[in-house]
Amino acid sequence: MDIDILRRGVAYRTKKVLAGIKSALLGRLRLNILILILIIGISLYAGYLIKGDNEMPTGLVTLSEALENCPKCSCPSVEPEIIEKECAEPEPAEPGSAETIIYYQCASGVLVNDTEYCRVMPNITTPDYGYTDGFTLAIDGITFIVEDQEQELYRIKWINYTLTNEGEHDIVPLIEVRVYDEWNSRVASQYPQKVIGTNDVLTGNEYIRSSAVSNIIFKKLPKTVRLALKNKMDDNGEGILAVTTTLE
């Protein structure tokens, strides 16, 4: 009796163990199949993406395809321009011949054998200028605005001028500004509407190019603006030169 129970118990346990092993194997097999299907699906999708990146987008063609579809089309080629120039060899100097001297022409027209001797002066482009005794005075421009339209009042804001000294005399420049309709003794005797002065000495080979602020008010157009150059070191107060321009 006891032996039958023991035997039945062992067989029962063995059957249970075998059933568990079978269930485990079948469960793992299903899991492996699912993993395999998932891997295959990912591989196929990745291959599709890679293939799509390598394909040319719709609407774009290569140059060779365009030429095949359009036999008359061509890509122009530009040949480089070839310029040939023959240079003759200089003839050798004969023994005892004179030495060649090179001269340079400065902006002022002076010929020198070294460029350092050129006088560096600004170019005068305005037609309103005067020159005497090495001094040049030029009116580069007059800036004026409408102060009162009804009364035809105008105001000069800026006076642009250039003064050069290419002479042998030093001066302390002083410029008198007058605005008038017609030049006469009465206008000449009146005090200038503006005085542009400095205490600096303008020596030879020096220049001044400046814009002077002005508040000169005048009525109606046209008007004449006169700049008169004087030397503050001259006790007689005589003018050196004068330049005029017309405001219209």
Image: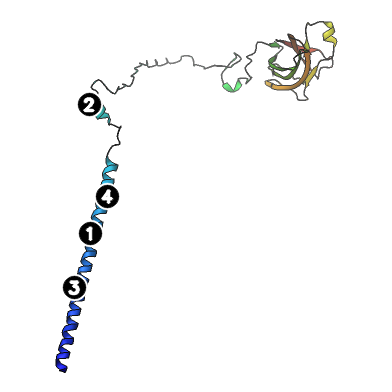
Determine the secondary structure under disc 4.
helix
Secondary structure, mark 1, is helix
Residue 129 image position (x, y, % from top left): 68, 12
Q: Which mark is residue 68?
A: 2
Q: In the image, what residue type sits under mark 2?
A: Glu
Check whether the beta carbons of the residues at disc 1 and disc 3 lie within 8 A of each other: no
Give the CA separation, mark 3 to mark 2. 67 Å
- Label 4 sits on what residue type? Tyr
Residue, x 24% and y 50% (percent of image)?
44
- Which amino acid type corresponds to the residue marked 1 in the rendered image? Leu
Between discs 3 and 2, the one toward the N terminus: 3
User: Between residues 30 and 190, which one lies in front from this camera angle?
Assistant: 30
Q: Which residue is mark 1?
A: 36
Residue 69 seen by the camera: yes
Q: Earlier in the sequence, mark 1 or mark 3?
A: 3
Q: Amino acid at mark 3?
A: Lys
Asked if the residues shown at circle 3 and circle 2 are in contact, with their CB atoms under 8 angstroms apart, the answer is no
Residue 108 image point, x, y percent: 61, 15
Callout 2 crowding tier (Cα within 10 Å): few <14, some 14–19, many ≥20: few
Distance Cα–Cα, label 4 vs label 3: 35 Å
Q: In whole angstroms, how far apart are the C-alphas of marks 2 and 4?
A: 35 Å
Q: Which residue is mark 3?
A: 22
Q: Residues within 10 Å of mark 1 (few under 14, many from 20)?
A: few
Location of mark 4 (residue)? 45
Look at the image and tell me in which quarter the C terminus lies: top right
Q: Position of residue 198 (x, y in %)?
A: 77, 24
